[in-house]
Image (cartoon, grey):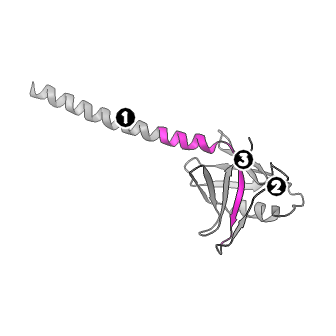
């Protein structure tokens, strides 16, 4: 009888660990799911810490990135098409301009900065791409 109680206790403990582990997977899936949308640039932080704010554009598709289920990234600068890939863990991105027409306004800085991005953080419905220790691009949900 004592062995039976011990076996039941061990089984319950094992089941608890499995449930905790599955709960973590759901959190990761929710985080990835919330990443899969179109994001619009709202702020550019230079390496010096200087912030260039973005408010309203005539072009709603400009300065956007869309993260897809197949881990690809598409987007648009002021004129050019953006393409790339991402690691769902946030540890690696590869983003580049797929076309190279003359940029307008902030487009040059945007397309030259994106290939430098080495990781991202998704928190509080904001996506932050880091291209240096102090430099980042802040995105908020945009048009789909």
Residue 16 against residue 125 in the figure, above or below: above
Which residue is tagged 3? 142
Residue shown at 68%/63% (left/top)?
116
Residue depth check, mark 3 versus mark 1: number of the one nearer the observer:
3
Of tags 1 and 2, which is closer to the observer? 2
Closer to the camera in the image, 65 or 4? 65
Label placed on residue 19: 1
Residue at 87% in and 61% down: 103
**Residue 43 or 5: which is nearer the viewer?**
43
Q: Which of the pair 140/15 is nearer the observer?
A: 140
Q: Which mark is first along the chain, 2 or 1?
A: 1
The quadrant holding residue 95 is bottom right
The dot on residue 63 is none
Earlier in the chain: of badge 2 and badge 3, it is 2
Residue visible at 64% across and 54% down in the picture: 93
What residue did someone put label 2 on?
Answer: 57
Q: How many marks?
A: 3
Range of magenta residues: 26-47
CA gap, disc 1 and disc 2: 47 Å
Q: Earlier in the sequence, mark 3 or mark 1?
A: 1
Q: For numbered disc 2, what is the local secondary structure?
A: loop
> Which of 141/48 is in front?
141
């Amino acid at each position: 009888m004592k062995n039976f109680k011990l076996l039941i206790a061990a089984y319950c403990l094992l089941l608890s660990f499995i449930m905790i582990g599955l709960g973590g997977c759901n959190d990761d899936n929710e985080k990835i799911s919330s990443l899969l949308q179109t994001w619009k640039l709202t702020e550019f932080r230079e390496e010096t810490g200087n912030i260039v704010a973005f408010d309203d554009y005539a072009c709603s598709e400009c300065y956007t990135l869309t993260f897809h289920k197949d881990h690809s990234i598409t987007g648009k600068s002021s004129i050019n098409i953006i393409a790339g890939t991402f690691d769902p863990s946030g540890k690696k991105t590869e983003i580049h301009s797929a076309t190279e027409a003359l940029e307008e306004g902030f487009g040059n800085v945007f397309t030259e900065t994106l290939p430098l991005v080495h990781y991202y953080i998704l928190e509080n419905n904001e996506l932050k791409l880091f291209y240096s220790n102090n430099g980042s691009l802040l995105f908020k949900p945009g048009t789909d």
